[in-house]
Amino acid sequence: MNVTDAVRIKRRIRNGALRLMTLALAFYLAFIAIAVLRSRH
Amino acid sequence: MAQATDTLPHDDHHDQPDTGIKRWLFATNHKDIGTMYLVFSLIMFFVGGAMAMVIRAELFKPGLQLVDPMFFNQMTTLHALVMIFGAVMPAFVGLANWMIPLQIGAPDMALPRMNNFSFWILPFAFTLLLSTLLVPGGAPAGGWTLYPPLVLQGGDYFPMVIFAIHLMGISSIMGAINVIVTIMNMRAPGMDLLRMPLFCWSWLITAYLLIAVMPVLAGAVTMLLTDHFFKTSFFNAAGGGDPVMFEHIFWFFGHPEVYIMILPAFGIISEILPTFSRKPLFGAVSMVYATASIAFLSFIVWGHHMFVDGMPLAAQMFFMMSTMLIAVPTGVKVFNWTATMWRGSLSFEPPMLFAIAFLFMFSIGGFSGVMLALVPADFQYQNTYFVVAHFHYVLVPGAIFAIMAAVYYWLPKWTGHMYNLTLAKTHFWLSTIFVNVLFFPQHFLGLAGMPRRVPDYAVQFSDWNMVSSIGAFGFGLSQVLFAIVVIQCIRGGQKASSVVWGDALPTGLEWTLSSPPPYHSFITAPEIK
């Protein structure tokens, strides 16, 4: 493996992790949003 | 400007483990972290098991003899939380940490520091959870499902439990992210996704389930927290909220959670059965599709946990049918496992014994699951010991037997020593006999109408409860043998070869490495042909 490959894979790992964290946060907020909309305050 | 070189110079250090406590505290090596997960899980298995012993001791005969009802309820609640989040899930994460890099030909997990963080959160989370036993009012006692409004009436334990659950969720999400990015980016050249071992496949799918549903649980318990402390009314009917909405949100998490605890087990069984049948896995690609189908269906069946809550007939029909549909991909799996063994040259080492026992007894749990999926039948079975029997068959001789099969399969690879096979087989037979003595009579109790989560019961339930408790004590004691086998094997023993299982010739990259494998597994990626 050369350095270019290593840098590319490192970037893919970081981007993948960030995307998955965003996905998790979106699920968290989405379900709270559903609950807010369904409660008749 | 790109520079071409064969090795990365900054990777030259860290080729030996640190010594003493630093090795574990600052661990970034996938094997060390995997070991810590597995040890933590074993400790929690005994903690949760001790709670189960209290429960079964109290239920040994009718009447209240050992503990007061409030403490009994605390035991049932903590037993579930400890076993689910402390024993089963960390055991699978430990196995993933150990085996995924070895099976895909990677040097380590993709995010080693995050791996360290996701493990070390857990001891804090469980210290917090278990310390609720010491606060005024005691530990949570409303069941692991934390249903409002009951849970909102809780005492000092409440914020501690909510925080502990958040911590467990963060740990699981970080673990899942690590698994996905490792599998997606660090497979050896030539290892297409469909050529990847089934254990890695099942974990990849499980990791996506975790990322989708752990935040949902976090959302649900955050709303409980704001209802309790900040006067919101998400689940408070008096303020315009809806307690049943909590159940919908909880079970949207809760049902996929069940599959989080069983899909990696399916992967393990798919590794072990071909080895000891000396045949390739029958229908390997259909196994992947079946796993993915089960994962998809797990998102649309949550309503079967709440049939008696009151829901439209159409919703009941939908949830009943979607639940029964899960039997199709699960049936594909059971068929493939059976076909793998068919006319194979079988041998019955401890991992194979546990895998075959899994096949039979998980199927018993599956059959009672189909019974519970039927709306009119569920109206009778719900909240009885039949449900307890069902999910314990799926989780104990299902998930936990698969974990034990995996440990017995890979332990010689991890330690470099073969364990005491006679002791391991004794452990298997005692566990298998006692687990059936423990849980099978609970079907009869449930069908006869004994409710779950009660410290006392009517006298007609006495006999089977006594039998069940004897099974529980026997099963609990048998697990001491497991700890002895593992500890003996870590301390020494007959040297294991790299293939470990001799003429069984297991396939997979992990068997190309020495036993134990080098500290960094694959410094140069192996070529897959």
Image (cartoon, rainbow, N blue to C red):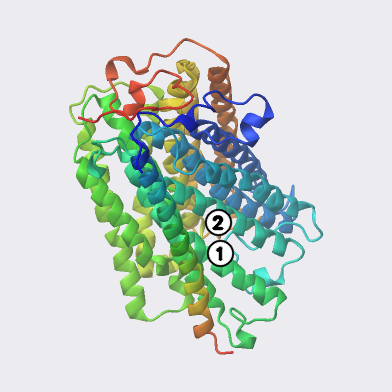
- Closer to the N terminus: mark 2 or mark 1? 2
Chain under label 2? B
**Quadrant of the image occupied by residue B511:** top left
Q: Quadrant of the C terminus of chain B?
A: top left
User: Quick check: can you spot residue B307?
Assistant: yes
Q: Eyeballing the image, is B483 above or below B189?
A: above
Label 2 sits on residue: B169
Chain under label 1? B
Q: Quadrant of the N terminus of chain B?
A: top left
Q: Nearer the viewer, residue B93 or B357?
A: B93
Q: Nearer the viewer, residue B507 or B50?
A: B507
- Residue at 40% x, 50% y: name it: A11
Q: Nearer the viewer, residue B161 or B172?
A: B172
> Do tags 2 and 1 sit on the same chain?
yes
Do the numbered discs 2 and 1 sit on residues whose CB atoms are within 8 Å?
Answer: yes
Distance of label 2 from label 1 (alpha carbons): 7 Å
